[in-house]
Amino acid sequence: MGARASNYKYLTELPPGKSRDIYIELQKAILSHGLLPGVKLSEDEVGELFGASRTIVRTALQALSHAQLVTIEKNRGAFIAQPSIKEAQEVFEARELVEPRVAGMAAKIIKPKDIQILEDHIQAEHDAIASGDSGEALSLSGFFHVMIADISGHEVFSKIVRSLISRSSLIIALYWKRLDTTCESHSHHALLDAFAKNDVQAAEEIMKSHIVDLHSGLDLKSRRQTKQSLASILKK
Amino acid sequence: MGARASNYKYLTELPPGKSRDIYIELQKAILSHGLLPGVKLSEDEVGELFGASRTIVRTALQALSHAQLVTIEKNRGAFIAQPSIKEAQEVFEARELVEPRVAGMAAKIIKPKDIQILEDHIQAEHDAIASGDSGEALSLSGFFHVMIADISGHEVFSKIVRSLISRSSLIIALYWKRLDTTCESHSHHALLDAFAKNDVQAAEEIMKSHIVDLHSGLDLKSRRQTKQSLASILKK
DNA sequence: TGATTAAAGATTGTATACAATATAGAATTG
DNA sequence: CAATTCTATATTGTATACAATCTTTAATCA
């Protein structure tokens, strides 16, 4: 995981406190593929790791389950979610509907300052890829989409996009075609060009085809096996 | 509230148990305007009402806060959410994007059996209006949209729609123009006609204009005041 | 009297003990 | 030896006690 973790603002309904911290740390680990689908999150183990009581840990795990990053099975515990093939399909269909609209809205009102921030972010993506930190790279490329949603100023769409992006990370872990290949693309750059011109329609189209691209990078025939227990990867 | 409460399947990430029951009961009360925005849900009070310990109640309240039906303020407690004007606007904008698509998908694959169920449901709406049970009528008219989402078979869209519909109920409580007027319309019937013909485009258009209609029924200039404490309305 | 402060009460936050359930391993049986 | 049952262990579910915080009331002072 990235030595310098992205300090981008994470969202959760949780009030500030230890539960929220645990939520954010686990989310980071999930989004950067430090924790893979299927891994069990035992309450004692997580509590031990973060020096928190089970009460606190349960609050965090329940929040993650509401965000659909974790599945809680009665009397069995919490596991990193494993989206089905159908869900994977649907998540990307939803992204194809919502994100182009959001990108268009962002294009309409984006300011030079925001464009600069996005450019820096793309640079950070490249750096992560260059340094071989594919987990961080993946996480950053997801955040790029969230940042655009935030720029649009539309909080309801923004929350929907956040949720879809998070789940996309699990989907990529399970169904991405070529494990070696990073999902870098030129689309992010192209999007910035459209933003710079405040070209709403171009932004919509580029975003649409970008997501269709990502979607087609998935192998939605069979689910990858992901055992790998132990949550010792959390220690950054 | 309706003597015969809608037994339509409620969704929550909560596993079966008392927390889930409380969640569902509170949700019902919120959606039918038995509990109005701003009302405090004290843990002891709710626990007393349902014969549950605070641990259980807290789980339910936290789930409701994740569904954005309840706002939890640190050290102050849980309150029925009060969507802002901006959020109200955004929720309906999101509905205008997502629901037409979902209606179109439903039109493509709907079966006679489903159409019959929807017809019966509309009848139940009329009955509720006739009997003056405006809370139940409102709740049913929201469920109509959820049922269509379920018929579409697209679970990701369906969950998004559920969330938007729930919040719409709070928004209507705060911003609906004429308190005396029920939000009945002919759109639901028109939608059924399109469904019967499997007319995708018509279904999309009717749904779109229906939601625009609802949207325009809101007075998004000022928020209504809703005091009314006490959660004694829960006892059906 | 009005505002400010102080104390009492009520409510939420957290840790922990105990109960219920599931899991893993040992013993038993065919 | 394979399959099954039983037992011991580990894990989650829930209630409750105590701590921290907020709210309300009472008391004090200008």
Image (cartoon, coloured by chain):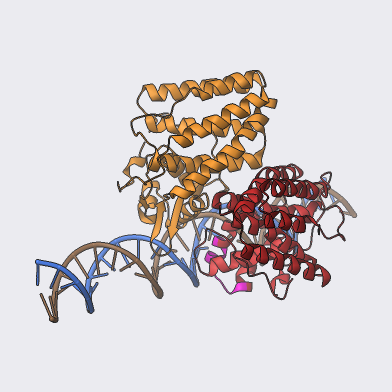
Chain colours: A orange, B red, C brown, D blue
Q: Of A78 and B125, which appears nearest the observer?
A: B125
For the image, the number of numbered tags is 0
In the rendered view, tell whether residue A55 sits above or below residue A191. Answer: below
The quadrant of the image that shows the N terminus of chain A is top left
Q: Of A45 and B139, which appears nearest the observer?
A: B139
Please state if A81 lies on the left or on the right of D26 as rendered: left
Mostly what secondary structure, the magenta segment? helix
Residue appearing at x 57%, y 65% in the figure: B57
In the rendered view, tell whether residue B200 sits above or below residue B51. Answer: above
Residue appearing at x 56%, y 23% in the figure: A118
Numbered range of the magenta stretch: B50-59
Q: Of B121 and B86, which appears nearest the observer?
A: B121
Residue B55 sits inside the magenta stretch: yes
Residue A64: image location, x then y, percent: 49, 50
Please state if C17 lies on the left or on the right of B163 as rendered: left
Q: Residue furthest front?
A: B197
In the rendered view, tell whether residue A112 sits above or below residue B206. Answer: above
Please identify the quarter of the rendering in which residue A200 is found.
Answer: top right
Residue D6: image location, x then y, percent: 22, 79
Residue A70 sits inside the magenta stretch: no
Please state if A39 lies on the left or on the right of A107 as rendered: left
